[in-house]
């Protein structure tokens, strides 16, 4: 063997064993804040890797989407079948400020509504709110028996279904275009639009279980911090309580003894 060749034979493995580092030691926890239109404002926490060099933590948090049950947001179990999507828009301190980003139904609720001997009527419409959000709203409704009806089935004719669908679209457009996103979400929570459709279509065919089952945001306006702070209302960063410092007691002056 030539002198000076294969120097690596005598040495150990290149680099040696890497020390196992806990990945959570590099992470930071942030609080997720819901808009003021919901009763529960603090909805959970989210993780992000600490700021390192050019990779800023707050930038990585922006545009994250969180799915929360409306029952948790409103403290009301009757709304457990609704899922609200909230998108992170801004980070202030250790708080992530979110805004409404869509709504959906749980699968079990949708399946519990579909039954035999009735017609299912669905419609969807694209609307633009007064604050330039473009949304796609999906509505669902079911026919029901008329008062004192003996017949077991309550199927609507295709012409009646078309009329009902047209009426649904008209009401959704009328209710959505005249208000901003915050006001529209406040209409979704108590199902005000669904009740309005039931009332308006009763002359064509009586309906039941009319819901806005899904909301998608297709286009959002340019981010405006002022508008986000309006949505969050009385939001203020939690900086802890101010404690009064106890007044320092005056120390008695030492008396000098003459002739000591």
Image (spheres, rainbow, N blue to C red):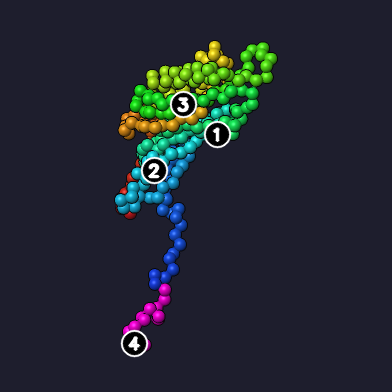
Marks 3 and 4 in Cβ contact (< 8 Å):
no
Q: Nearer the viewer, mark 1 or mark 2?
A: 1
Kindly identify which residue carries mark 1: 106
Q: Nearer the viewer, residue 34 or 101?
A: 101
Q: Alpha carbon of mark 3 to alpha carbon of mark 4: how far?
A: 81 Å
- Magenta span covers which residues? 1-13
Q: Is residue 34 visible?
A: no
At which x and y percent is residue 122?
A: 51, 25
First along the sequence among labels 4 and 2: 4
Say few, some or many: other residues with alpha carbon within 10 Å of mark 3 (under 14 / 14 to 19 / 20 or more).
some
Magenta stretch contains residue 10: yes
Q: Is residue 155 visible?
A: yes
Kindly identify which residue carries mark 4: 2
Kindly identify which residue carries mark 3: 124
Say few, some or many: other residues with alpha carbon within 10 Å of mark 1 (under 14 / 14 to 19 / 20 or more).
few
Q: Is residue 202 above or below residue 94?
A: above
Q: Alpha carbon of mark 1 to alpha carbon of mark 4: how far?
A: 74 Å
At which x and y percent is residue 101?
A: 42, 33
**Numbered disc 3: secondary structure:** strand
Kindly identify which residue carries mark 2: 61
Say few, some or many: other residues with alpha carbon within 10 Å of mark 4 (under 14 / 14 to 19 / 20 or more).
few
At which x and y percent is residue 9?
A: 40, 80
Left or right? Give the position of 80 relative to 236. right
Marks 1 and 3 in Cβ contact (< 8 Å):
no
Say few, some or many: other residues with alpha carbon within 10 Å of mark 2 (under 14 / 14 to 19 / 20 or more).
many
First along the sequence among labels 1 and 2: 2
């Amino acid at each position: 063997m030539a002198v000076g060749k294969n120097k690596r034979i005598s040495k150990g493995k290149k680099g040696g064993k890497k020390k196992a580092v806990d990945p959570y030691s590099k992470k930071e926890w942030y609080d997720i804040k819901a808009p003021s239109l919901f009763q529960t404002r603090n909805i959970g926490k989210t993780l992000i890797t600490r700021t390192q060099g050019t990779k800023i933590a707050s930038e990585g948090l922006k545009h994250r989407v969180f799915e929360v049950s409306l029952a948790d947001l409103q403290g009301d179990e009757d709304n457990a079948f609704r899922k609200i999507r909230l998108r992170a828009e801004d980070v202030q301190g250790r708080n992530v400020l979110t805004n409404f980003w869509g709504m959906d139904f749980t699968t079990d609720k949708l399946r519990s509504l579909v039954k035999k001997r009735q017609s299912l009527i669905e419609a969807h419409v694209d609307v633009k709110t007064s604050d330039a959000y473009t949304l796609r709203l999906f509505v669902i409704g079911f026919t029901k028996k008329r008062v004192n009806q003996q017949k077991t089935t309550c199927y609507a004719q295709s012409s009646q279904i078309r009329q009902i669908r047209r009426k649904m679209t008209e009401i959704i457009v009328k209710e959505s275009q005249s208000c901003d996103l915050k006001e529209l979400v406040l209409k979704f929570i108590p199902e005000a639009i669904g009740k309005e459709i039931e009332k308006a279509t009763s002359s064509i065919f009586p309906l039941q279980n009319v819901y806005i089952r899904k909301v998608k945001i297709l286009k959002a306006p340019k981010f405006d911090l002022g508008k986000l702070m309006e949505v969050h209302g009385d939001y203020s960063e939690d900086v802890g309580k101010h404690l009064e410092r106890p007044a320092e007691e005056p120390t008695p002056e030492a008396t000098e003894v003459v002739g000591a």
